[in-house]
Structures are given as C-alpha cells and as structure tokens.
Image (cartoon, coloured by chain):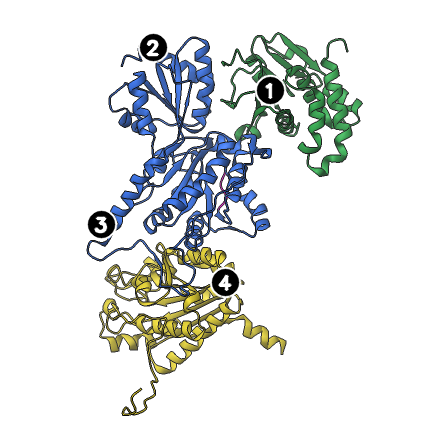
Amino acid sequence: MAKRVLVKGNEAVAMGAIAAGCRYYFGYPITPQNEIPEYMSAHLPEVGGVFLQAESEIASINMLLGAAATGARVMTSSSSPGISLKQEGISYLCGSEIPGVIVNMSRSGPGLGGIHPSQGDYFQATRGGGHGDYRTLVLAPSTAQENYDLTMLAFDLADKYRNPVMILGDALLGGIKEPVKLTPYKKQPPAKDWALTGCEGRGQRILKSLYLSEGELTKQNWKLWKKYQAMAKEVRYELYRAEDAKLILVAFGSVGRILKTTVDILRDKGRQVGLLRPVTLYPFPAKAVREAAVRCGRLMVLELNTGQMVEDVRLAADCQAPVDFYGRPPGSIPTPDELAMEVDKVWRKTAGKGGAK
Amino acid sequence: MSKAQPKMKQVFDRPRSLKDVPWHFCPGCHHGVIHRLVGEQLDAFGLREKTVGVASVGCSVFLYDYFDLDVVESPHGRAAAVATGVKRARPDRFVFTYQGDGDLAAIGTAEIVHAANRGEKITVVFVNNAVFGMTGGQMAPTTLEGQVTTTTPRGRDIELAGPPIRISEMLSTLDGASYVARVAVDNIKNLKKAKAALKRAFEYQVNGWGFSFVEFLSSCPTNWHMPPEAANERVGKEMAHFFPLGVYKDIKAARDEAAE
Amino acid sequence: MTRSANPMYFDTIIAGFGGQGVMLMGNMLAYAAMEAGKQVTYMPVYGVEMRGGTANCTVVISDRPVGSPIVHEPMCAVVLNRPSAERFGPRVRKNGLLLVNASLIAKDQVSTRAKRVYHVPSLELATEAGNPRLGNMVMLGALAQLSGLLTVEQVVKSLPKALDTRYHKLIPANSAALRLGARFVSPGS
C-alpha cells in the first residue's frame, strides 16, 4: 500500500511533480505558494534535478520554456500577480507547442490584492490569459491528495498535447494539511521527437511561434485549434449526491469541497441538493452540466469571485435550466453554513421545483 | 576526380553550420558577417550537432533559417532566461543566444544581468547597431546622443531619454561574468580581433569556465539612412568612440597571469 | 451519510497567542488522527490575525473524506488566551465542548452555550510534567481524551513521527504532559 503522509497542499504539488519525473523547477517567491519552491529546492538535487530561483516571474517561465524545449519535465509555480507576469511566456509555450506545468495557488486581486484565497483567476486561466487565440489545460484540485494526483496528471497531459497545463488552486488548498497517499508514478513518459538535443545524426529542429509566410500562421492556428478540440476527451468532474437532486450546485476547487458539507447540511434538512464539481476547468465539463440541467431542471453556481465560471455554466446549460449564482469577493472563506443559507434561499424560491424535465 | 581538371585547392567556403540560403539582411548590414563568424566557430569546435541556439526577437529572429542547428525562439528580451533553462537541463550541449540591442539592452536587461551574474555557462552574441532595426528604426537604449531615429526626430536628447547604455562595461562589473569583449567587423583588423574574441568566448563555454559575452558593434545602413560604406565608417568613427572596443574581462587569462 | 448521522466526525478550533504552540497542537492532532487511520484536514489561519490578537487552526477529523476544512460553529474549541476565549467560546455548538486554559483565563471571562466546559490549569500541570512550556501538550491530551475519536495513547504513539528528531529528547516530558491533561478531564480521576 502506498505511504500516507501528512503534508501541506503546496508540498503535495511538489511531491507529485517529482514523482512524475519533474527534474527542473524555476520560480520566484510569492505568498501563498512558497512551500513549493522550498520543497523543490530541498528535494530536486536529491534526484539529480535542478532548482533555480529566478530573478523574476518572467525569467522563470522562460527558463521553463528553455528547459522544456530539451524534452525535460519542468514546472514553475506562483500566485495570481506572478501568474499575470508569466502570461507572455505561456502564450509562447502554446504557440511553440512546448509542454510545461504552471501552478497558480491563487490569491486575491486585483493588483497586489491580498493573500486570501480567491477564485478570481478563473477567466485568466481558462481563456488563455495572454495574447493570441490559445488555451491551456486547467486542472482544479480540491484536496491535498488531488494536488498530488492532478500534478502527476498535468505532466502527462502536457506531454500528450505538447501544451502547457495549469493547476489552479488557491491559498486554502496550498495551506491546508491533509494525509496524502503517495501513489507511485508508473507511466513511461512519451518519447519526444521534437525536443532540442543538438541535431546529431538528424535534421535541424526548431521550436518557434513566429510564422510570417503566407498562410503559415493560419495553418498553425488551425493545428492548435484541432488540438484544443481533441482535449475535450480529458474532461473530468465529480458528482456528489446528485442522482436524485432537484437543485444541482456547480463549484470548483475549495468552494467545491466546502459545498460537500453544505450539501450534507441541506440533505439533513430534507433538501434534495447535489453537487457537480468540475475538475478540469479547460476543457470545461459542458456536457455534464447540460445533462445536469436537463435532468434536474435547476442549477446554482457558487464561486469565490463575483461571477466567472457561471458564464461557462450558463453557456453549457444552454437554457435547459435556470442558473442561479452566489459569489463574493475574497476576504474570508465561506463556511458551509453560510453557503447553505444562500443555497436554501434559492431552494425556497423555487421550492425544489426542479426535476420537471 | 577527372585527371583533365587542374588541381585546385578550395580556400574559402560556407561553414557547415550555416545553410546554403540567401540572407534577408539589408545591403551593408553586419549581421551576415557576424552570422558567418559564429558559424565558423561552431565548425571549428565541432559543435554543430551538439548545439542548441536561442533566437531572440529583432532582425536576428530568423537565426534558424540560416543556422543548420536546433534552435528555440525566445520571447522578446528573454533569450538569456531561455538559454539558462536549456543549459541547466542539458549542460552537455553548447548553448548560445544571438540578440540585438533592442532585445538585450532594453526589454531583456534583467535577464542578461542575472544570467551573467549567475555565471550561466552560455555564450551571448550581442549585436549593437544603436537602433531598433526590425521595427523600423526607433531609438534603442544604445542610440547615440543626437542620433536621429523615428522616435527621436530631433536627435536623441539626453535630458529626455538619458545617455546611451554601455552593456559590456556594465556586465564586466559582475562577479559572475567571466568573459566580456566588445568588437567590430568594420575592417579586416577588427574582423580578426572579433574572430579571436568569439573563439575565446566559445572556449569559455566548451571548457566550462563560465559566462561569455561578445558585443559586436554593427551597422544599420537602412535605419541610419546611410549608404553601406558610410554606415560602415560610422561604426569605427562614432560608435567605437562611445563604445570602446576591447576585452573587458577575461578571468581565465587574469588567473593564468596571476599563477605565473 | 449525513453530517449529523456520522458518528465519526469531529471538528475543533484551537486558538491562542502566537508562540503558545497552537499550530503544533493542530498538527499533532492531525498526525495522530492520520496514524489512527482517519481522514483529517488541518487548516492554519495566517495573515493579519497572526500579527494581531490570536493565531488559530481548525482540525476536522472524520471516517469519510473531509468536505469543508473550515467550520464556523465548531463541535469543540480549545482556547489558550482571553481573546480566543472571547472570539471562539460563544461559537461552540450547544452540545459541544470547550477547553479553557485556566492558567490564563478566569472562569467568569468565558461565555459559551457549550454544555461541556473544562477549565484546565495547563501551566500548573505542565510544570508537574517537568516543563512549564508544555501547556499546549496538556491541552492536547485533554482534547484527545474528550474528542472520543482518539486516545491519548494514540497521540503519544505518534510523537516520534510527528516531531522533528531534534525534539525527540523532549518526548518523555511531552508524553507526561499529554497524559496529565487527559487524566485531568477524565471522569473519576
């Protein structure tokens, strides 16, 4: 049986990365994710890897680009303001089709904001974030265990699609301590016939995102688009007590897990509510949301922001069900009882009239 | 070989590290010469198949079209950080960046200073032509006082824009930088010195001695609005006056000397 | 299974001044719970509160995966100083448990609806255990004993793994403090 250890969410990310074969880490200090670089600085040298503290967030994402261009598994991590600075590099990674894992243990904004947990970076993460028409895969863990497991998955997906993958956590998920089962990584990372290793015995390889010849860039963008379409099959989500629900809550990350307790509280009161928790934010589990809308007839989105994912849910629900929303800016973490009150308002308004379809 | 043909010895050829393609550079531009010098050293050290080149943004972005090597393209100014990543992951490969003054001395200043200071075992080829070339001739940090560019129509005003920045002098103050030289390719004498400096810079990386940096003063006839010959002359007269040529730092030579 | 119908669910807020060992208590409780095969979440509260009045952490222990790591009205609170007693005492559930550091907090300074309130003289008991700085371990022993989920011996057993090796020489005193705290709140002791 795999070993269980009690670790911080941030450490679980770092442990998952090293287990998945990440050997290079470049980063810059920012609260609340510092346990990731600290763990990497202590443990990467033990496995023959390199930890390097960069002079800036911009430098660290570009160091990732360089190291990943050689075919290595590479990670960087930061928190919201730092992730904004990395966006240029993420755009280049997508354009040049270089894989890499970027962790955002997000905090509150805009600007310097604060270090409270926040889900205000949902748009930035799922809409590409930088310039150009591109997407990154986005994974949203909700426990320390998922931090470990999804970081491993992130490396596989990055290599599979030659695309950066973002882990979108928050200050809560980075800071909590939970037991984590250290499942060993058993896959064989794929061979990389595009990696820059010096052109010994073969033709030149180029990794670039500049396409100036007639039609070239259009072609490259269509190629990327096809890739984003293919990513749809990576959709992951969790349903909690949703089978007979007449109101399905949709939430990701820390709010998603807090809502499990909320669902329990409301079920105790006889409210038939359930939860759909997207684990991949891009690709978004649109089909599952639509099915939930059709089956249950009423959805409610809850976020620790003033309304971002709700747009994706409304698009996915496709007018098959009304979509209510409760969100609030960062500052405090909503308790399950507070959320139960908000959900109950919607429940009473509709008196559990869902399930009509 | 047919006996009828007279025996001829070929004394000049394209370096193997360069492709047999025409340059896109403007007539009189020094990039072509500097590309060739880099190609010669790659050949001389037998590095073509052991190299990862790092292209930057500017006129030299098409590095991969001219060099027959593995090349990764960097965002504007980030070549030194990208090269750091490449070299850290593959310390057994030869890694060089090729950057202009807009790229290295403006938007990429932080990256070059810190790569130099960390003593990254990379080689940086820095081409300083005192102007943003590819974007159409705007002021660069290296633009000389009074020089007319598209964004200094009345000439560079020091009060407004500050004086030109001397990168080689600045980098040579860093303990992490091991070899720093400024050269020019405007005449045969300087060309020979440039070649020697580049060779030394390559030696630094091949032998693991540390960070090496060669600044080339270069002409830009198009954006200087000068005929090639006059532009070439300006490099020696005006540019070299403000940006003195020479070896600014050679720690290996200094150490060897101290040991004797 | 619902929250109320789940007998193996316990949550607690531990609060006090920075330096009183609040975070270590939470960590050790979480560690012992994990060693006992339970699901557990430990959430430290950092930020402005760390520099102002109190530092606190929340520990949720369950047989099932933990949903919310944050609790507004806990089943139990352990308060080591007066500001913590004022802040968290009133929040404890009616049928809940409040452990008060009697060495720093007078009985009339505690306002709570919790039915079970224990005033534990942590400093005196820690001194008896051989180190007056182990007041947090006294409180932890009492907490483990009353939680109904763990025995104090399970906490003692987890000490070698939960504590950094440089603190291992303190294990005997820690064990004594834990046991004294547990005994203090045991009926018939």
Of badges 1 and 3, the one in the foreground is: 3
Marks 2 and 3 sit apart, C-alpha to C-alpha, by 49 Å
Which residue occupies 34% across, 73% down? B36
- SS at mark 1 in the image: helix
- Give the residues drawn in magenta, as a range: A28-32
Of badges 1 and 2, the one in the foreground is: 2
Does the rendering let one see residue B157?
no
Q: Residues within 10 Å of mark 3 (few under 14, many from 20)?
A: few
The amino acid type, in three-letter code, at marker 3 is Thr
Q: Mark 2 vs mark 3: which is more N-terminal?
A: 3
- Kindly indicate the quadrant of the structure image that contains residue C39: top right
Left or right of residue A238, residue C156 in this image: right
Which percent across, then down, holds residue C16? Answer: 62, 23
Q: In the rendered image, which residue does mark 4 sit on?
A: B92
All told, the count of numbered labels is: 4
Q: In the rendered image, which residue does mark 2 sit on?
A: A352
- Depth check: give the residue in front, A65 or A197: A197
Q: Is residue A198 above or below residue A347?
A: below
Name the magenta segment's main secondary structure. loop
Marks 2 and 4 sit apart, C-alpha to C-alpha, by 66 Å
Residue farthest to the left, as pictured: A214
The amino acid type, in three-letter code, at marker 2 is Gly
Q: In the rendering, which numbered label is found on residue C84?
A: 1
Q: Colour of chain A?
A: blue
Marks 1 and 3 sit apart, C-alpha to C-alpha, by 62 Å
Q: In the rendered image, which residue does mark 3 sit on?
A: A218
- SS at mark 3 in the image: helix
Does the rendering let one see residue A345?
yes
Q: Colour of chain B?
A: yellow
Marks 4 and 3 sit apart, C-alpha to C-alpha, by 37 Å
Residues under numbered marks 1 and 2 in contact, where contact means CB atoms less than 8 Å apart: no
Of badges 4 and 1, the one in the foreground is: 4
